[in-house]
Image (tube, grey):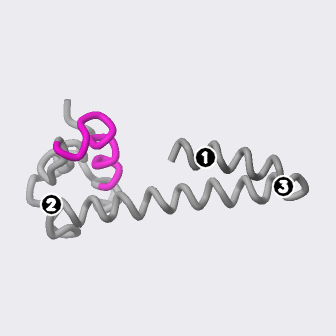
């Protein structure tokens, strides 16, 4: 089933999110720019406006993953600032899920 048609003007992030979903379901061998385009509801040529190839999309997905990881670790550090042991254990859980 196709995702809703792309209208929101954030094609790059829509393709990254589509790529994340495809990787979770099908693994790296299942990811193609064409599948990401289909998932995002755009033409098969649209991804090439932002990504030269599959590896470029994977690099962007990786960067987004590290950004999300950093956000979570930062939140934990702030939330448990007065409790270093809790910072460590909560941070370890986030790392293991990463």
Occupied quadrant, residue 8: bottom left
Q: Residue 51 location, x and y as percent?
A: 20, 67
Occupied quadrant, residue 62: bottom left
- Give the structural element (helix, strand or loop) at label 1: helix
Label 2 neighbour load within 10 Å: few <14, some 14-19, many 20+: some
Vertical order, 63 against 89 (above or below): below
Q: Distance between the residues labelled 2 and 3?
A: 47 Å
Marks 2 and 3, the one that precedes in the sequence: 2
Question: Residue under circle 3?
Answer: 84
| Residue 23 forms part of the magenta stretch | yes
The numbered mark at residue 3 is none
Q: Residue at x 75, y 58 (%)?
A: 77
Q: Distance between the residues labelled 1 and 2?
A: 34 Å
The numbered mark at residue 94 is 1
Label 1 neighbour load within 10 Å: few <14, some 14-19, many 20+: some
Left or right placement of residue 54 versus residue 10 in this view: left
Q: Which residue is most to the right? A: 82
The majority secondary structure of the magenta stretch comes to helix
Question: Residue under circle 2?
Answer: 46
The residue segment tinted magenta is 16-29
Marks 1 and 2, the one that precedes in the sequence: 2
Q: How far apart are marks 3 and 1 (CA)?
A: 15 Å
Q: Which residue is most to the left? A: 45
Query: Is there a contact, CB below 8 Å, between mark 2 and mark 3?
Result: no
Marks 3 and 1, the one that precedes in the sequence: 3
- Give the structural element (helix, strand or loop) at label 3: helix
- Give the structural element (helix, strand or loop) at label 2: helix
């Amino acid at each position: 089933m196709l995702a809703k048609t792309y209208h929101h003007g954030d094609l790059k992030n829509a393709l990254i999110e589509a790529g994340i979903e495809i990787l979770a379901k099908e693994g790296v061998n299942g990811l193609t720019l064409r599948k990401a385009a289909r998932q995002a509801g755009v033409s098969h040529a649209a991804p090439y406006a932002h990504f030269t190839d599959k590896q470029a999309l994977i690099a962007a997905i990786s960067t987004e993953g590290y950004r999300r990881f950093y956000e979570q670790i930062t939140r934990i550090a702030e939330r448990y600032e007065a409790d270093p042991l809790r910072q460590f254990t909560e941070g370890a859980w986030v790392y293991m899920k990463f």
